[in-house]
Image (cartoon, grey):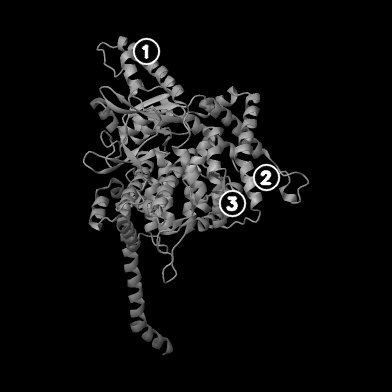
Amino acid sequence: DVSKKEKKSTDTETSTDVTHRVRSNTWTQEQYLKFHQTVGKRKTVRRLLEIMSVLSGKILRPLVCSLVRDPHLTRSSNEWDEFWLQQSRSLSNAERVAKGLPPLGPVFVKLGQALATRPDILHYPLAEALANLQDRVAPFDNFTAKRIIRREMKAAMKKNKEQQKDQKHKKQFFINNDEELRLFLDSLSDEPVAAASIAQIYKGYLPGYGSVAVKVQRPGIRRTAEKDATLFHTVATWLERLEWPDWSPVVSSRGERIFGSAQFVKTVDEFTRRVLEELDFEREADNMKLFGDMYCNRRGSTPDVQVVVPQLITELSTRRVIVMEWLEGKKLTDICIECDDRQREIDENLSLVRKAIEVTLSQLLTTGLVHSDPHVANLLKVRTSDGRSELGYLDFGLISAVPQRFKDGVVCATCQLVFARNIEAVADLCVDLGLLPEEKLEDPEERKRFVNALEEALNDVLIWPKDERGRSTAVPRVRFEKALASVSTLIKRFEFTVPPYFLNNARAIATLEGIALKLDPNFNILNTIYPYSINHLMLNPGVSKKSEETFLEICRSPKTKLFDHNRFMMLLTDWSLLTGYRKRKIYWDLITSIGTRRVMSRIVRESIMKRIRRIRSLWYKHFLAYWEQCWMPELVGYHAH
């Protein structure tokens, strides 16, 4: 546990301070580009030939042979499932793809891991095979691994002794001499308990502490990732510069870029930069400490987000080895098929996945510090001492800091889309989300084209349920298999960009939804995101001007443009039904919220204006009726006379 002094400083830490701490530990673009300068052209070409050799020999050739044996393969989903399950030399086609990625290096494995969480986008057999890349990659030999651990531990001991000389009161460390180091190394498991693309983990026993997990980095992996970063950057630059030739049959496209305004370089650089960041274990150790100080159920400073975070053994962690507390748990997707209480276990795991989504939303919209890699191997169901199941987090290589403008944009866009169905407001919020430059919407014609394209994309991605009267009433479903094509269309037609924090957080949410869909095919992630957004919009804990304006806008009548009590009650009903909270609690939360108190004066003013308009309208109505009954006949008679 952290000391009282550290605890006090953490409690007073603001979201801005957290963002600064994360960004100060994140590689800048200049630091990243240094890797492009360190890898020469010869090494890049050699790496390209190596990739082509592995792809052609281990992946493409067997797949082509399978296609040749079955030339009448159509685009039917069932036939493709059968294709990926076809066996050849004791391996299916899907398993062959998964086995062929690890030899290519960590960048390719990370790409496979991202795709594995989306069985609704890929075919299920292929997604299942790629899921093994998360923690079932073939380990490297134990002799090399333990030699690296011994070398790093000796370096850590030397560093600790130097610190002792500078301190007046000598601190006792867990390992102080060669004999204690030998005992620790002997306690390590004979085989790694888990092996991933970047590292493998051993279980050990640390005298004076207890069971620990030792994470050791694969040898030579950093250099491979640097070569891939250079190669991918070069290929992306070439693709961006491709233009239609002068002999193109479409005259208007001659000289234009083939891929439009697609920004391949930014996307590729961001992806490979994040992989390189994951290889820096000193950075991951800092992320783990920061994440634990905020969210750990034993020492965290955020009361509404409480998860299990392993404690870091700082004195034994280096750039290539991390030593941390051992967490005993199970994956959220590990379900006993033949057990009698199988359904109870599914419900329990699904509740933890929902909690993971709520925790991610709280990180995204409240604190701004987000764990961006919550795949199956990084989330555990941990049993506490009192028998309760808690959510445990592992692997802190990808931690994102979210700017306040993005937080407000996500909340406002969700409410405008689901509750108000206001596509134009969502288009305006794309600027706050960092997806579109502000000047792009200043031109009325360009704005109209973008709104129409966005509406078309949302109609493809969202499925609105219909009631008996034919009106959309329920929360829509998201079709992620259509999302990629829709976003690609927007990127080509407009200067639509995907910032790093947007990509990482979208990946985190999509990964969690993929886990939930494996447990419950009817799971709808918007049923969790929408009420959380309403809560954040109405309480407005950050006292955001954008949230305040959006709250008033969706509660105003489309006709009078004044506050409409009925629309406000509809919003409260949605909040109550989807969260299960009683309206009494919701009213109390609204009354005690700083953000609501700020906007209450405007609500009262608009309500009074609405009542005045109604009284004025009724007065004119009755006055004219009285005029017609009493005075009009006399005036008509007078003029006739």
Q: Position of residue 480 (x, y in %)?
A: 49, 52
Q: Provide residue 627's location: percent of width, then percent of height.
A: 35, 79
Secondary structure found at label 3: helix
In this view, the residue in front, 512 or 60, is 60
User: Does label 2 or label 1 sit earlier along the sequence?
Assistant: 1
Q: Amino acid at mark 2?
A: Ile
Local SS, label 1 = helix
Q: Tag count in the figure?
A: 3
Q: Mark 1, residues whose alpha carbon is within 10 Å: few (<14), some, or many (≥20)?
A: some
Q: Amino acid at mark 3?
A: Glu
Whole-angstrom CA distance, mark 3 to mark 1, is: 63 Å
Residue denoted by label 3: 446
Tell me if 551 is positioned left or right of 461 in this view: left
- In space, the residues marked 2 and 1 are separated at their CA atoms by 57 Å
Quadrant of the image containing the C terminus:
bottom left
Amino acid carrying label 1: it is: Lys
Q: Residue at x 58, y 46 (%)?
A: 491
Q: Residues within 10 Å of mark 3 (few under 14, many from 20)?
A: some
Residue 612, compared with residue 278, is above or below; it is below
Mark 3 vs 2, N-terminal side? 2
Nearest the viewer among 353 and 98 is 98
- Is 445 left or right of 279, judged from the image as shown? right
Distance of mark 3 from mark 2, alpha carbons?
21 Å
Q: Nearer the viewer, mark 3 or mark 1?
A: 1
Q: Which residue is mark 2?
A: 258
Farthest left residue? Answer: 386
Asked if 177 appears above or below 241 in the picture, the reply is above
Residue 389 at what x, y percent from top left?
28, 44
Q: Where is residue 40 drawn, in percent x and y?
A: 63, 23
Q: Which mark is residue 158?
A: 1
| SS at mark 2 in the image | loop
